[in-house]
Image: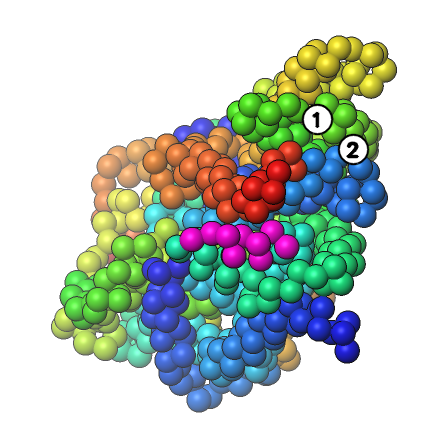
């Protein structure tokens, strides 16, 4: 109690302190962000994982995005072999040709419109912004890890230094300034593309009309906004 | 009235509750951040704080502003959609963090129990001051292999080779210009 | 990878909720269960369990005071926990904690204890000396009215408080069950039965704990155990245990029968890593054995000494079994991947904020609180607790 009261007072100073100005050309209500992941294009180079770690100071051993490699036999789609060595950060070992199929699946926060993680936060430290990005208030988070438990996709973690929850922010600090996310910037094949569903000129609208696209774990009804093209049924 | 005389102690207990509740409401008024609830059940200022995180990757448009000759060549070749920083990395140099301000007694007590939040260290950016950060040219033997090493796991249409067979240990840029690598597009050295 | 079998999402490999989060529902379960035992006498007029009435309330309070501590140690930022009072998120079951805890502590438990002990508190405030006298004086809240009418008011209000207290106790522990039961991401947890199973297993643990405490402490004080009291408690323990066991079996059978996508993963887990904690400790040792022992005492007339031994064994095994149940829910639920393709292991540290020593310390602490409470507010009906009464004899 004696320690917690002054600690709370100091923590509150940070919370009540002024906040930086947002980009003047950016209006939140004009955007609704998502991501398109094109599976047939992913080569498992791990550039996205490395770029994200650099851009967002992601601690070693934790991942805001990662790549999984699937090895699936046509006789048993429910038992794929999946690996993700260090999240795919340094790429993957060379695979030998055999009679099963391989493919890579980049994973990240799905910025769900009905996210279970924001539902369970006891204090309102995680939320979906008016432009569709699920963010975490680092000054408010208690570090209870309830959101980590509630995410069906395993995209959250507790930062060991800050002891608060962290996850992909869709590089909010970049997209609000007209840049693309670090992972999209680094992807050499265009397997990852930032999409703005509210922008009528965004190529996603045409893409969705001409391709079969899925979200991960649709049965969870999370309103996920990371759309996967060419997603195999064996993907978990 | 005698009924209340005998229940007087209960009113004292209830009174304690009411007092605590009033104190709570007063404290709450001062303590809840002002921007809380503006857009939803969260501190709206947090959006600005997340947006203020310093970017490390400049984005290919920034590179192309100065290096337009490379951009032109790349735009005509097979690596047209491979962005500059995908190979050259984020051109930042992270400086050592300045020593934090001396904590006062309360802050020192608190730090015994609760770790202080780390701050972002300052960075130098090549795009802002090209002389301060000189980009390291990546070693092509390692860099190109990351994408182009043949593996049954990669999509069939993607150009891939077995490096030992293909180049016999020579660095890739001996024959391929990384900015326009196809041999038949006049991109060789 | 260290301790990982198969594939886990990279962020899932280390467990988020440790043994302290196993301890928390166990402790609030004891609180709720002890209170239900006390309410048996107060509301349902089961006279036989009267000797344990005050002890049950004090036990509930001792454990309730300890309950927030594992949570505070677990939080990354415990100094921010007042946020749960200032801005609780209405869609989060966890946000309920602050208010439900405070309500149960002040408006139910402390109020009921105060009302039941008030006459004694007033007398002690007059009899005792020194700093103890000040403590009692504060506890009287300045009122020394212990007339017949005042005590009758206390009795009536206390009865109402207990009536309110029963659903409050269910809420205090049931919401923990809902915290797990409402997580659709985790199929081991997600179930509408979860709050109900938690409540019934809480009752088992609370009743068993009070029974053991009563028997143990009475023996330490060299007094005779009221066997009719213990027989009655054991009977309630038996029947509530049957309900608890049935609920858990329904969940298990349902899972095995429906065999949805999570089943293969969970089934493997129960046969390997969770075999000892779940099958051996929770089910066989912690549920079936005490049920059989208690069942025998219900149908066969055995001598007192044998009954008391069986109750002791059954009660102890029940407590171990209920702890194992919390372990299997909390830890077990984090051992398998949400991809259903792999498993990890729980590495418990010895000396760490959330380690084994911390867990043991937090388990011992409520007994220290209880010792202080028993000294301050003796709950023994068989002793004269007032000097005046003793002098009058």
Query: In the rendered structure, which segment of residues is drawn in magenta?
Result: C119-129
Give me the chain letter of mark 2.
C
Q: Position of residue A11 (x, y in %)?
A: 37, 69
Where is C307 relative to C36, above or below? above
Q: Residue at x 67, y 48 (%)?
A: C173
Question: Relative to residue B140, is residue C100 drawn left or right?
Answer: right
Task: Specify whether residue A216 is in view.
Answer: no
Badge 2 local density, few (<14 within 10 Å), some, or many (20+)? Answer: some
Q: Residue at x 81, y 38 (%)?
A: C46
Q: Position of residue C221 (x, y in %)?
A: 54, 27
* Closer to the camera in the image, C259 or A211: C259
Residue beneath disc 2: C48
**Residue A2 picture quarter:** bottom left
Task: Specify whether residue C257 is in view.
Answer: yes
Q: Which label sits on residue C324?
A: none
Badge 1 local density, few (<14 within 10 Å), some, or many (20+)? Answer: some
Where is B70 relative to A108, above or below? below
Whether discs 1 and 2 lie on one chain: the answer is: yes
Q: Position of residue C228 (x, y in %)?
A: 76, 25
Q: How is the image coloured?
A: rainbow
Residue beneath disc 1: C226
Question: Which quadrant of the rendered structure holds the C terminus of chain C?
Answer: top right
Where is A186 relative to C182, above or below? below
Q: Residue furthest right?
A: C299
Dominant SS type (magenta) = helix
Question: Which quadrant of the rendered structure holds the N terminus of chain C?
Answer: top left
Cα gap from disc 1 to disc 2, whole angstroms: 9 Å
CB-based contact (under 8 Å), mark 1 and mark 2: no
Looking at the image, tell me whether mark 1 or mark 2 is earlier in sequence order.
2
* Closer to the camera in the image, B91 or B25: B25
Give me the chain letter of mark 1.
C
């Amino acid at each position: 109690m004696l320690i917690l009261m002054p600690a709370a007072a100091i923590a509150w100073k940070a919370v009540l302190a002024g906040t930086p100005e947002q980009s003047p050309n950016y209006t939140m209500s004009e955007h609704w962000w998502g991501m398109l992941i094109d599976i047939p294009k992913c080569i498992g180079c791990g550039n996205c994982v490395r770029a994200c770690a650099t851009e967002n100071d992601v601690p070693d051993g934790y991942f805001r995005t990662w790549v999984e490699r699937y090895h699936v036999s046509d006789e048993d789609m429910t038992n794929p072999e999946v690996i993700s060595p260090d999240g795919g950060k340094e790429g993957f070992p060379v695979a030998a040709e055999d009679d099963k199929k391989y493919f890579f699946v980049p994973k990240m926060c799905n910025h769900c419109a009905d996210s279970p993680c924001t539902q369970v936060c006891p204090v309102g430290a995680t939320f979906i912004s008016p432009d569709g990005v699920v963010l975490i208030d680092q000054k408010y988070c208690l570090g209870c890890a309830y959101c980590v438990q509630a995410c069906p996709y395993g995209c959250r973690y507790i930062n060991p230094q800050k002891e608060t929850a962290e996850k992909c922010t869709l590089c909010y600090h970049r997209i609000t300034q007209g840049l693309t996310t670090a992972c999209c910037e680094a992807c050499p094949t265009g397997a990852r593309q930032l999409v703005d569903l509210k922008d009528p000129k965004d190529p996603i609208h045409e893409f969705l009309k001409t391709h079969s696209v899925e979200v991960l774990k649709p049965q969870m009804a999370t309103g996920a906004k990371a759309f996967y093209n060419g997603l195999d049924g064996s993907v978990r | 009235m005698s009924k209340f005389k005998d229940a007087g102690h209960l009113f004292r207990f209830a009174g304690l509750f009411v007092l605590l509740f009033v104190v709570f409401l007063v404290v709450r008024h001062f303590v809840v951040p002002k921007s809380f609830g503006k857009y939803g059940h969260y501190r709206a200022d947090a959006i600005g704080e997340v947006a203020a995180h310093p970017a490390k990757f400049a984005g290919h448009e920034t590179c192309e502003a100065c290096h337009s000759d490379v951009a032109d060549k790349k735009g005509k070749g097979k690596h047209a959609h491979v962005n500059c920083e995908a190979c050259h990395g984020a051109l930042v140099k992270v400086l050592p963090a300045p020593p934090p301000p001396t904590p006062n007694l309360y802050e020192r007590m608190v730090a015994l129990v609760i770790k202080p939040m780390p701050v972002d260290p300052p960075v130098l950016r090549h795009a802002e001051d090209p002389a301060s950060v000189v980009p390291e040219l990546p070693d092509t033997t390692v860099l190109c292999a990351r994408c182009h090493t043949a593996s049954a796991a990669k999509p069939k249409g993607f150009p891939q080779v077995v490096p030992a067979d293909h180049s016999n240990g020579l660095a890739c840029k001996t024959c391929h210009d990384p900015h326009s690598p196809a041999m038949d597009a006049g991109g060789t050295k | 990878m260290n301790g990982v079998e198969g594939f886990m999402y990279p962020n899932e490999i280390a467990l988020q909720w440790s043994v302290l989060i196993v301890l928390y529902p166990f402790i609030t379960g004891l609180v709720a269960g002890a209170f239900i035992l006390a309410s048996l006498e107060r509301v349902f007029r089961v006279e036989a369990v009267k000797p344990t009435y005050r002890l049950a309330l004090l036990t509930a309070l001792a454990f309730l005071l300890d309950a927030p501590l594992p949570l505070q140690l677990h939080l990354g930022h415990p100094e921010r926990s007042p946020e749960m009072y200032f801005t609780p998120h209405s869609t989060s079951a966890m946000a309920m904690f602050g208010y439900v805890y405070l309500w149960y502590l002040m408006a139910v438990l402390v109020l009921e204890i105060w009302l039941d002990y008030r006459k004694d508190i007033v007398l002690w405030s007059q009899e005792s000396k020194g700093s103890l006298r000040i403590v009692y004086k504060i506890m009287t809240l300045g009122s020394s009215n212990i007339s017949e009418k005042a005590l009758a008011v206390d009795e009536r209000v206390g009865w109402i408080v207990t009536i309110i207290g029963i659903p409050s106790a269910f809420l205090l522990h049931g919401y923990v069950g809902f915290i797990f039961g409402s997580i659709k991401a985790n199929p081991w947890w997600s179930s509408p039965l979860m709050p109900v199973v938690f409540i019934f297993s809480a009752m088992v643990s609370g009743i068993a704990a009070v029974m053991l405490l009563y028997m143990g402490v009475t023996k330490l004080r060299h007094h005779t155990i009221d066997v009719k009291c213990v027989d009655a408690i054991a009977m309630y323990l038996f029947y509530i245990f049957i309900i608890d066991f049935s609920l858990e079996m329904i969940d298990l059978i349902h899972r095995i029968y429906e065999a949805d996508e999570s089943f293969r993963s969970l089934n493997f887990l129960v046969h390997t890593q969770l075999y000892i904690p779940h099958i051996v400790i929770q089910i066989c040792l912690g549920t079936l054995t005490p049920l059989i022992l208690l069942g025998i005492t219900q149908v066969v007339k055995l001598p007192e000494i044998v009954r008391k031994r069986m109750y002791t064994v059954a009660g102890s095994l029940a407590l171990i079994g209920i702890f194992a149940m919390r372990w299997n829910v909390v830890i077990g639920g984090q051992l398998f991947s949400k991809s259903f393709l792999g498993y990890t292991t729980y590495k418990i540290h010895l000396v760490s904020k959330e380690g084994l020593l911390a867990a043991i310390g937090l388990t011992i602490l409520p007994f220290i609180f209880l010792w202080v409470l028993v000294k301050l507010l003796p709950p023994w009906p068989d002793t004269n607790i007032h000097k005046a009464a003793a002098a009058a004899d």
